[in-house]
Amino acid sequence: MGIIRWLPNMTVVYCLAGACFFGAVTPAATEDKLVTVTVQASSEAPGYEAYRALDGNPNSMWHTDWQYENPAPPHELSIDLSDRFEIAGFTYQPRPGGGNGTIANYEFFVSDDPQDPGRAVASGTFTNRDRENAIRLDEPVTGRYVWLRALSEVQGRNWASVAGLRLMVPGVEFRGRPAVVAMETDELRRQFLALQHDLRRKDYFAEIADQAFRPDALIFPSDRDPADVVLRRTAALLEALQTTQAAAALSELAEQLKKLQDEGKAIDVDDSQARYALYTKACKLRRKIALANPLLDFDQIVFIKRHRALYNHMCDQYYGIAATPGGGLYVLEDAFGPDPQVRDLLADSVVQSGRLAGERLCGGPSTPPDVRYDGMGTRHGVDTGGSFLSPHLSYDAQQILFAYVENRGDPTHRHHTEAPDRGYWHEGRCYHIFRVNIDGSQLEQLTDGTWNDFDPVLMPSGRIVFNSERRGGYLRCGRVCPTYTLFDMASDGSDIRCLSFHETNEWHPSVAHDGMIMFTRWDYVDRHGVVAHHPWVMTPDGCDPRAVHGNFSFRPERADMQLDIRAIPGSHRYVATAAPHHGQAFGSLVVFDPNVPDDDVMAPVWRLTPEIAFPESQGPTRAQVFGQAAPLSEDFYLVVYDAATEVPAIRGPQGRYGLYLLDSFGNRELLYRDPEIASQNPLPLRARPVPPLIAERSIRVPADQPAEATVGVVNVYHSLMPWPEGTQIEALRVYQILPLPVASARVPHNTGIQIPQGADSINLARAVLGTVPVERDGSAYFTVPARRELYFQALDAEGLAVTSMRSATQFQPGEQATCLGCHEPRRDAVPAPTSLPLAMQRPASPLTPDVDGTHPFSYPRLVQPVLDKHCVACHREHADQAPPLDSSLVTHPGGGHMNRPTTYYQSYVSLAPEFGFYDYGGRGWMDPKWYRTTPGQFGARASRLYQMLKEGHHDVQLSPEDLHRIVVWLDSCSLFYGVYEEEGGRAQLKGQLARPTLE
């Protein structure tokens, strides 16, 4: 127990068993003894459980059920005090405002017999509807058990509610023990409502039937009601378990199921009461069968409690500034038994090292405080504790890595262009990575600083991969959102190095079956921002990043995102969460097979939870129902789940996820739910095999020193997209993509006319690093700068781009990478050559730099000199017939989400919209051109301007270099600026060189 020191009408901090709590509570006597009691009710609604009548918080309450049964009074609260106490009376606090359920007539009982309350020791009518009612007994009564019976409600309705119940025992304060799991009846009701919801959607299930991982998880045309569904799915579960060593133990349960199936055939489907009773019996039998699974060879589950982030977006959910206070790191003990217990793993832990040495990591209140985040870098409200994120268990199950934010310090974003030398937040507003032993000892802080560090994963080498903002940069589609990408560090937090130089976000690293890093990457070059956040892999040292599938999928046919990807034991497949772009990391669960060829639709992907349509891309964004699957096999998983986020009939708070055992046949069993706060990230507490160790391919080069990688292409003609007939590729052009160093909400200018396929985002700034030759057999062998984000174009004999990547890649120092072709099918392997490709028979070609104005990119230096030499005077002379092509400054109005008014040269405004190339074609989500470049229909090849100049425009004859300058401009999406920053933009307008502040 613990001691509480109270101050009237104030938020208090108290410690109980070494854990810190925060919250507004009912004042009590100084240094009262705190006694935890068990509270039960004759009826309770989800989120309004019986214990809330004695939780000390007047803003919460017990309320009888009104959603399902709406029982009539009388209603009872019963309290087991665990010992005998002399009780002088009690106080009843109605709900604020004295609304629904406020008790009118009552009876109060005290007894030593839990089954017999005896005669009432007090009865009457509460007179105060909106403030505390104090009832003193004629004389004190001693007993262990207490009952408050509500005989009627002030408006004569069926309900009863209690915001606060205090027993008058001098020197003692009683607190209700929170329920470990939701009431069994409540869980059965929630699942019943969810199944009723599904049964009304049979047309939907028919549409996606061929995409279900197991057909049993669908709703069948023959399913009449929830009882039918549960009996059918339970039979599928039983059949699967009968193939395991549990078969013998299941024989009796199989007989019971057969009897229930016979009952189901006999009971009229219109007899709703009998059918609900059948449903209840079937669910209870299903639970017995499910918990007999031999894969449940552990009895403890590591998990965290946390509220959903304050801002509903895939990026903001992992900013410390958007963290909702509350929660902690826990172990669920006897997880599959009748009475699981929760252990606060950090209850007695003190940080041993780092800036927070000597402190406890406190999560604050279980009920969220009044704080908010505006999505633009500013947090509002008073914080009352920290927040936890992303636990990861070591292979020997002896240590846990996790992230924690203190929620204190300057609550505003720090805008600057000095990344990656410093981050964007106060260190108390950032997630940092910690490690602790499974018994709570040796709590260590591993990272610190003004960056968010989170999602730690222990690699087979002993190094730790994690997500971090240390790369620098922002997302391009508005607001104030720093990007985070993959880093790694030594096991003690030293030797931090960047694994990914990607310019947009990455999520949730994990270890693939073969020891590679599996993660989610947001990869969109000249494409729309809500596509292409799907699985990627790379080596543990950041080499050879490749998309697994989905990078060019049609949005309406697949989930917006696949997050929390985990390797499935005993399989080569993976499980993931199909989540929304404008939401958090929850949705529907899918299984994918990396060995199945990607058709840009659903070929490699199956729906594990088909009842939930992919949020945002196919269904409502709010349907963030499942998440964080920990696979036990292809058919069984620990998951988090909250039906209230999708089923309108399930009322109450959304996002209060519980821990569940889920199977692929459509069944799920609740293991634990805290009614006040979400439980997340379930991890079986047991040792697991260490994946294969992959040797590093890169070399160590200090970050401030230049480094190179070597790239080989076997045959550029080996391609997923057909080349135009007669195409001869003679060179590759290498571009560097520049990350956005200023928040997109503050970008002073667009880089050029908006690319319509990427209309939600700032156009990428880029630089031409140079070109390399392609041999007659289609091979190339060359060097490129390491630690830069790159993409390539294939050039014909005239130096025109035939096609261009709309994806990006990178290389580590010393990496030697080989590609079979130019965006070849992913499953194709490099064949054993009959002869060494020509390019590989010579040293690697260095990049040949391009003309002035390409690196850094600058329309004033690349294109305007050509116009000044050949065009300006004539167009000025014929102003009534020809557009002006001078370098006077004009403001283009822009238009659209991120295409703000921007100052350009007059010539750019005259040429780019009508004669430039910035539109890849395609007019919607189901058009392939929306995602991929069509070879031969890109850049100068597709531009009216190039054809006009090549064929001759009046007497204008451009030199090869001058025509080349126009070609490079057209092949670069007809951009104007090569930098995002205001100072650099002003310099470029003057024709000066301007280097980006972040590369």
Image: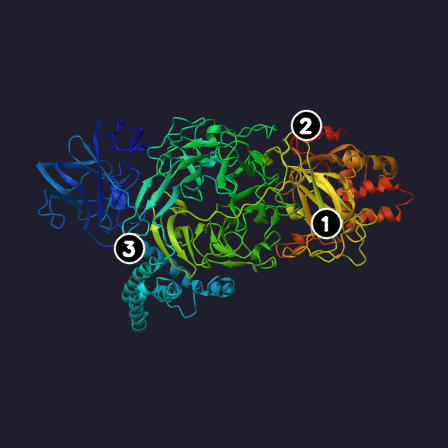
Q: Where is residue 764 drawn, in percent x and y?
A: 67, 40
In screen coordinates, is 729 left or right of 345? right
Work out whether 846 lies above or below 416.
below
- The residue to which callout 2 is attached is 983
Q: Secondary structure at mark 3?
A: helix
Task: Identify which amino acid the numbered label 3 is placed on.
Answer: Thr
**Cα distance in 3D space between marks 2 and 3:** 64 Å
In screen coordinates, is 359 left or right of 33? right
- The residue to which callout 3 is attached is 185
Q: Where is residue 381 drawn, in percent x and y?
A: 42, 31
Of 740 and 914, the residue lying toward us: 740
Label for residue 304? Answer: none
Neighbor class of circle 2 (other Cα within 10 Å; few <14, some 14-19, many 20+) is few
Q: How was the colour assigned to the protein in this rendering?
A: rainbow
In screen coordinates, is 115 left or right of 45? left
Q: Mark 2 or mark 3, which has the lower sequence index?
A: 3
Neighbor class of circle 3 (other Cα within 10 Å; few <14, some 14-19, many 20+) is few
Q: Quadrant of the C terminus?
A: top right
Label for residue 713? Answer: 1
**Cα distance in 3D space between marks 1 and 2:** 39 Å
Task: Identify which amino acid the numbered label 1 is placed on.
Answer: Val
Residue 674 appears in the picture as rendered: no
Task: Identify which amino acid the numbered label 2 is placed on.
Answer: Glu
Q: Secondary structure at mark 1?
A: strand
Of 842 and 977, the residue lying toward us: 842
**Cα distance in 3D space between marks 3 and 1:** 63 Å
Neighbor class of circle 1 (other Cα within 10 Å; few <14, some 14-19, many 20+) is many
